Amino acid sequence: MDQALQHLVNGTVLGGTYALLGIGLTLIFGVMRVVNFTHGELYAFGAYMAYGLVALLRLDFYLSLLLAALLGAALGAVIERVLLRPLRGADIDSVMLAMIGAALVIQNAQMWAWGGVAKLVPSPFAGTPLILGPVSVLPLRLFVFGVACALLLGFWLMLERTRAGIALRATFQDPETAALMGVRVGLVGTATFAIGSGLAAAAGALLGPVFMVSPTMGDLVGLKAFAIVILGGLGNLPGAVIGGFALGYVEEFGGGFLSTEYRDAFGFLLIILVLALRPQGLVALKERVG
Amino acid sequence: MLTRRTTLKTGLLSGLALPALSRAVRAADPIKIGMTQPLTGVVAASGNYVANGAKIAVDVLNRAGGVLGAPIQLVLEDNKSNPREAVAAVEKLVLRDRVPALIGAWSSTFTLAILPKLMEYKVPMVVETSSAARITTSGNPYVFRIAPTSEMEAIGFAELVDKYSPAIRKIDFLSVNNDFGRGATEKYGAILGAKGIPTGRVETMTPEATDLSAQLTALRQSDGDTVFVTTGVEQLTLAMRQAIEQRLNKRIVSTGGSFPDALIHQPLPGGARSDHVLFYAPWFPEQALHPELARAYTEEWNKHGWEFAGLTEGFRGYDAVLTVAEAIRLAGRAESEAIREAMWKVNIPGVNGNIRFQKEGPAGRESGQNQPNVYIVRLADGKTSLV
């Protein structure tokens, strides 16, 4: 029972960060119909920015996290304007190839800039865990989970309660009609890619101090982000959150009680199951009529 | 100082460069030595350390005149912590750069992937790190390993096991799921088992894994008192940090020569301590078999301003270059087959200890295996001590 409780806490903390990863990816797909292969690299970019700002420039830890996310959003905006905007209307293969190329360029640029050796991001949190009965968790992990939840909530409020959110949702549902209603669809595209990239960079900046920062850290994360999005249903925002937590729990409980050797495989087994039994994902999008 | 330098020239170089010094200075084409290491990817820290060690050995040798009157050129290729890339790197080194000898490839998985290519191109390779037994027992006469096998390591550790207080009674394993990790688990388990120390739980992790909470929570349930961790520097550091979070209140011993240098600058809380099976302990060069050589290597490394703890792995590259250069000198020419034959005559001092090869594997197709030294270094509160 103690072990199960610990796995539950671990899975929840992990799931929160997975949700953050998934939501940026699914947002970009939902609004722009672009499969963002740079997502993992933007995650690594955020982590490196946090490292540079905290460890090298000695800036405040919390300010550095914010700046890292904003820099990630700025990089996303540049990618959209320079790479995706000229490809608007191009076939999906061309866009995918361009995004794969961009991912390779970003990863190699980071390798060139920072070297291949992993870095540790210093954090102001104590290294000793908080102990609640049979369960223990690091304060840093709780902070990361809290910020991830706050970002998810803030993002949801932005979507539901602001004019920008309405414009974004309108473009998400029907870009042509949204354009006819006066929504600046081009600007929404740039903003969407910037927000999605910023969320990926925020995840990297938050998890950099928990793990270590290396140029290839985005590889596995990018793959997992795709797994989360497929689990929840492509382009489905609540689905990404549910998919993130589902993956976190499956990995944690599968690894803890069945086999750690196949820990990563459990998540992908779940995807196979979902695709076989519910191809639209765990949370189905409402079909557009007309 | 002068006396020490003189000693170094005789001890360190072991005649590698002195014959060359006696010759008239002339322009000569450099002699290439190929090296493939994981310079990027999940075990990049270790690969970079080894590559740095090789670079300073080349500098030292070239300052003393090179070998056979020619300077040595290190041709370094990144295998990106990936066995497929390791094979591609060797293809490039042999076919395009025409290197007559190789050094590589850090992980046993990368090295095992390369082995058929050595047979195909008939190029000898000094294996500087990999520990899987199969590397020298599969009948590949082009392999010469200066690193210890997992079995040698485990035997070395078993000799010191009685020094532990409280005694080690039951062991668990947390190993990377590849030839390196599985090999260490098997050999340490068997050799400590023969000393009456049973194995409890065995947990594995993929080389890319960063969140090890499931493994560590599972290990916490075991009644073992000591966890052996086998993986690269990055994952070892993560495992040790996350062990604190998961309250894994057990002794941690790392194998394979990996050392979590980041934990010197950012020590683990609560006075946590860990032991590390290393093959060079740079904090204690006087304990090396050849202290002068060890100090010279350490000084060269420090001149570059590289991370001090990287010395624990950098020596592998240093010793590997000394070995290949000596084989070239003994061969009298930089040709692969001559170098391979000369490897059997190599007998030089290295940072780890003496380097000379014994035959291992099927008769007629034996590989060379060196008998290195093993040290156990304790890390507590950012400070190191020898066990």
Image (tube, grey):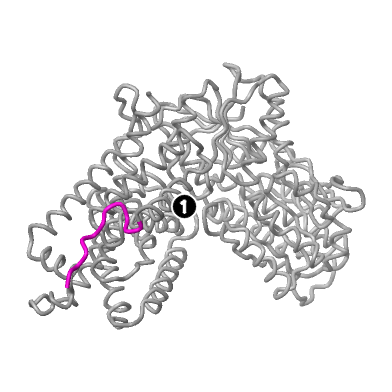
Main SS class of the magenta portion in the image: loop
Q: Going by the picture, which residue comes out furthest to the right? A: B364
Q: Residue furthest top?
A: B166
Query: Which is more toward the observer, A285 or B303?
Result: A285
Instruction: Assign a secondary structure to mark 1.
Output: loop
Q: Quadrant of residue B57?
A: bottom right
Horizontal side of B125 relative to B264 (left or right) equals right
The chain identifier of the residue carrying mark 1 reads A
The magenta span reads A279-290
Q: Nearer the viewer, residue A115 or B281?
A: A115
Which part of the image, by quadrant, shows the C terminus of chain B?
Answer: top right
Q: Is residue A180 in sight in this rendering?
A: yes
Residue A187 appears at what percent x and percent y? 17, 75
Please, what is the three-letter code of the amino acid marked with disc 1?
Ala
Task: Say which quarter of the image contains residue A136.
Answer: top left
Q: Residue at x 88, y 65 (%)?
A: B332
Residue B112: within the magenta? no
**Is B315 above or below relative to A252?**
below
Q: How many marks?
A: 1
**Residue B120 image position (x, y, % from top left):** 79, 66
Q: Is residue B264 visible?
A: no
Q: Does residue A281 show up magenta in the picture? A: yes
Q: Residue at x 8, y 78 (%)?
A: A182
- The residue carrying pointer 1 sits among few (fewer than 14), some (14 to 19) or many (20 or more) residues within 10 Å by Cα, namely many
Q: Is residue B250 left or right of residue A180?
A: right
The residue drawn where x is 79% and y is 52% is B144
Residue B272 as seen in the image, left or right of residue B38: left
Q: Position of residue B380 (x, y in %)?
A: 49, 30
Residue at the disc numbered 1: A118
Q: Residue at x 50, y 33 (%)?
A: B383
